[in-house]
C-alpha cells in the first residue's frame, strides 16, 4: 500500500477519534479499559492515535465493537 491520501488520513483520524469517543463513553480511562478487556495499553493508545501513520484494520474495529457491545454499523454511524 502506498502513501496515504488526504482522504485516507481524514478517514483514519475519524476512526481513531470515534474509538476514543466511544471508549470514553464507557466511563473508563485507557488504563481501566485495557485492564477490563485484557489488552495492552499501548495498543489502545495506538488505536486512538491521530498522529500515527497507521490506521486500524476492520478486524480491530470489530474487536473493539465487541468489547463495548455495539455493531459495526453503529460504530460507523457518525457524522
Image (spheres, helix red, strand yellow):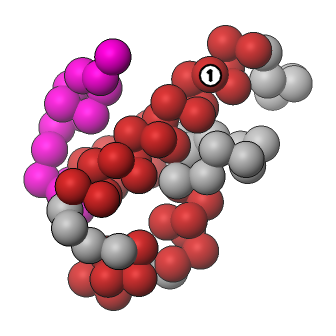
- Residue 9 in view here: yes
* Direction from residue 71 to residue 49 in the image, left or right: right
Mark 1 packing: few (<14 Cα in 10 Å), some, or many (20+)? few
Q: Position of residue 10 (x, y in %)?
A: 62, 22
* Direction from residue 77 to residue 8 in the image, left or right: right
The quadrant holding residue 33 is bottom left
Of 19 and 70, the residue lying toward us: 19
Q: Is residue 13 above or below residue 50?
A: above
Mark 1 — residue?
Answer: 10
Q: Position of residue 59 (x, y in %)?
A: 42, 45
Q: Which residues are magenta?
A: 66-79
Q: Quadrant of the N terminus?
A: top right
- Residue 38 in view here: no
* Direction from residue 48 to residue 70 in the image, left or right: left
Q: Is residue 43 above or below residue 66?
A: below
Q: Which residue sits at x=39%, y=39%?
A: 18
Q: Quadrant of the C terminus?
A: top left
Q: Is residue 13 above or below residue 63?
A: above
Does residue 57 belong to the magenta stretch? Answer: no
Q: Position of residue 39 (x, y in %)?
A: 42, 78
Q: Secondary structure at mark 1?
A: helix
Q: Which residue sits at x=14%, y=44%?
A: 70
The quadrant holding residue 67 is bottom left
* Direction from residue 60 to residue 52 in the image, left or right: right
Q: Which residue sits at x=79%, y=23%?
A: 4
Amino acid at each position: 500500500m502506498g502513501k496515504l491520501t488526504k482522504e485516507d488520513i481524514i478517514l483514519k483520524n475519524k476512526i481513531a477519534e470515534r474509538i476514543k469517543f466511544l471508549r470514553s463513553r464507557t466511563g473508563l480511562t485507557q488504563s481501566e479499559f485495557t485492564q477490563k478487556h485484557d489488552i495492552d495499553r499501548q495498543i489502545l493508545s495506538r488505536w486512538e492515535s491521530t498522529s500515527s501513520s497507521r490506521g486500524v484494520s476492520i478486524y480491530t474495529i470489530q474487536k473493539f465493537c465487541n468489547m463495548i457491545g455495539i455493531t459495526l454499523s453503529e460504530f460507523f454511524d457518525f457524522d
